[in-house]
Image (cartoon, rainbow, N blue to C red):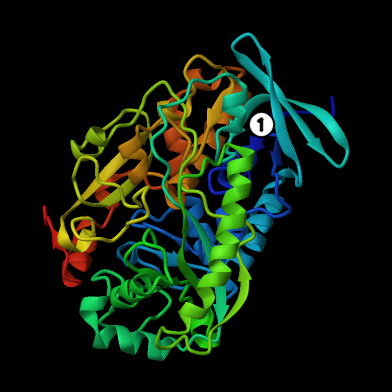
Amino acid sequence: MARRTQILVIGAGAGGYPAAIRAARHGADVLLIERNPVVGGTGPMSFVTEFLSCENISGILREVQQRLAAHDAAPAEFLPEYFNLAYDPEMLKLVVLDMLVEAGVDILLNTQVVDAIMEGDRIKGVIVENKSGRQAILADVVIDASGDADVAARAGVAMQPREAPQPMMMLCRMGGIDWQRLQQHARANPDDFSKLWGAPPHALDGAQYVHVTGWKSLVQQGKDEGVLPGTFGHHLSVFGATPANLRNGIGYLYAVQVLNRDPTDAADLTGAEIEGRRRARDFLPFVKRIPGMERAFLIDMAPQIGVRDSRRIVGDYTLTRDDIFDGAVFDDEIALKVYRGPNLKGWVRHKPDGSEGGSGHDPAELPISVVVLGLPYRCLLPAGIDNLIVSGKTVSFDNEAHQRVRLMPECIAMGEAAGTAAAVAARDGVPPRQVDVAEVRALLAAGGLNLDRERIRLAEVRETLASRGLNVAMA
């Protein structure tokens, strides 16, 4: 046995680092384990360079934004109706690392969890492997923020039925981008671009306007020529227009999808990494057809492919798509999210067949609902297992709820809740299922996380969407 701790957090991504920070700030002894050599999760590792859907920005996410801004790595001013917060993933590594160290979190990098230590239906800790060999680590409470529910799976937790997987993405960081020419072309050809993100009425500014999506005719031309596969989708995007990137001609190319891969299967995940990198390399010559990217060059590909969905646990409660659109309110809400999108059963933002953005699927062609939804604490508690909390995109959602509630801002909020609940459980000597949820909610609010629906700027969100030509329900 290598270590005993009060709170053990597995995974230093969006669902994990907030959990470790919150638990440590509440006085708990916290150990954070991460399989990669850096913290921050899919931002630095998969080049997800925007916190998507920040309409309820608060808590640790707001603190991260302010710290990034101090390093010229994010906008200094950010309003919820700007939607997406662009940032520099390299600086995110350091900002998150600073917050963990300042909170007093112990960190163990390059460490892989290989098994769960169980005593009946209670998790007691985990088995890990790293440069020091195989070790046991015991804890009062374990938080699984692995991104794949790895600990929960090894603990025997039941999982939700799996659907066809959403596409994985291989993103590339590019230099030599003429942002001015790129957006001028978009404004001159508005029908070729997304209404929401294609041709902004004002210049890209690193705050309200942070990426460009479109080039539909160019993509179709590539398909007709056989340069792009038929499953390519209907558009591509250039992300990451922070103030610094706009000045320096740097952006992130979102184009290459890998279909029908299981991230929990080692061979499948390896195949996805290989396919994604080779296809990204072969796609790069095509990029030079984009006005403003004639002189673009590859800086690097993401260290690991981006994975949208994986296992999802069966928890004490399963959030459903009907909960979202029926306006369900829960007594144990530990996070609020604004969802803006079609209220259509079966609608998936990122279609498993890769055909995202086509006719009948593009949100610009569909009625858009804007709703506030609450995430129950019970979704984080695996049914039948004690002393384990799950945080991030693998909590207890049905498939359609997951499509709408799996982004980094809500994962960060779930992490804050998981860490706070774990600290309360360890302090009181009770399982996480028995904590006083009212106290957890009060502690979250005291730490800056907004749990008040009335404080969310829904009217401004709807007005912004309508101003860009979307069919938005205004009430």
Q: Work out whether residue 275 or residue 26 is closer to the camera in this orientation and state it.
A: 275
For label 1, the crowd category at 10 Å Cα-Cα, with few meaning under 14, some 14 to 19 and many 20 or more, is many
Q: Does residue 41 appear in the picture of this structure?
A: no
Relative image position of residue 256 (x, y in whole percent): 47, 63
Residue beneath the point at 47% across and 27% down: 313
Relative image position of residue 297 (x, y in whole percent): 58, 82
Q: Work out whether residue 428 or residue 130 is closer to the camera in this orientation and state it.
A: 130
Relative image position of residue 303 (x, y in whole percent): 64, 60
SS of the residue at dot 1? strand
Residue beneath the point at 60% across and 49% down: 271
Image check: 280 left or right of 358?
right
Residue beneath the point at 57% across and 26% down: 152
Amino acid type, mark 1: Ile
Relative image position of residue 328 (x, y in whole percent): 23, 33
**Res 206 quadrant in image:** bottom left
Image check: 464 left or right of 437?
left
Task: Say above or below: 30 vs 368.
Answer: above
Image check: 272 left or right of 124?
left
Determine the residue located farthest toward the right in the rendered image: 132
Per the image, the residue denoted by label 1 is 7
Task: Say above or below: 210 vs 452.
Answer: below
